[in-house]
């Protein structure tokens, strides 16, 4: 089996059953949102994934809402680290990145985690 540790836990089962591409597409399309998966696929899911994969997603999540992570935290952590290394304080970093100083501190002090899955997106 491939190493899927880069995926958030909620999507590991999706990747194992339907493939990493489906899990990543879920993150790209619904990342950062809570999504309700009905027992039967919606037209939107069918358009996005096709009949078989949309049905499999609905079967997998069984008519329940799930939070789909966006996978962007690591990139922000790297940006904070780079700016701090250049001598910027948390206030300047927060202003530059458009986030709170508290979030800057949280990112700077968090242990290294997952890699950014979508490095080209904000």
Image: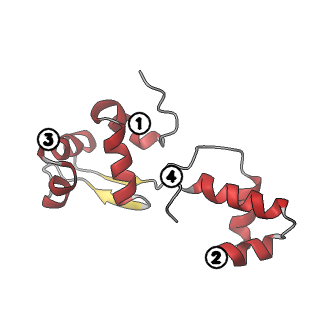
Residue 99 visible from this viewpoint:
no
Q: Which residue is mark 3?
A: 52
Left or right: 19, with 94 as reference point = left
Q: Earlier in the sequence, mark 4 or mark 3?
A: 3
State if disc 2 and disc 1 touch (CB < 8 Å). Answer: no
Q: Residues within 10 Å of mark 4 (few under 14, many from 20)?
A: many
Q: Earlier in the sequence, mark 4 or mark 2?
A: 4
State if disc 3 and disc 1 touch (CB < 8 Å). Answer: no
Quadrant housing the N terminus: top left
Q: Which residue is mark 1?
A: 12
Q: Which mark is residue 31?
A: none
Q: CA distance from mark 4 to mark 1?
A: 13 Å
Q: CA distance from mark 4 to mark 3?
A: 25 Å
User: Of helix, strand and loop, which one carries label 3?
Assistant: helix
At x 20% / y 46%, what residue is drawn? Answer: 58
Left or right: 113, with 105 as reference point = left
Q: Quadrant of residue 114?
A: top right
Q: Which residue is mark 2?
A: 98
User: Of helix, strand and loop, which one carries label 2?
Assistant: loop
Q: Earlier in the sequence, mark 2 or mark 3?
A: 3
Q: Which mark is residue 71?
A: 4
């Amino acid at each position: 089996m491939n190493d899927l540790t880069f995926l958030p836990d909620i999507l590991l089962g999706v990747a194992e059953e339907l493939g990493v591409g489906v899990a990543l597409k879920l993150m790209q399309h619904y990342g950062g949102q809570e999504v309700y998966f009905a027992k039967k696929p919606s037209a939107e899911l069918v358009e996005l994934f096709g009949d078989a994969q949309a049905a499999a997603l609905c079967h997998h999540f069984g008519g329940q809402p799930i939070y789909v992570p966006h996978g962007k935290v690591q990139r922000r952590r790297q940006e904070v680290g780079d700016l701090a290394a250049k001598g910027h304080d948390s206030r300047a970093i927060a202003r530059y990145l458009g986030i709170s100083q508290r979030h800057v501190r949280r990112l700077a002090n968090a242990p290294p985690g997952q890699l950014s899955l979508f490095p080209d997106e904000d």
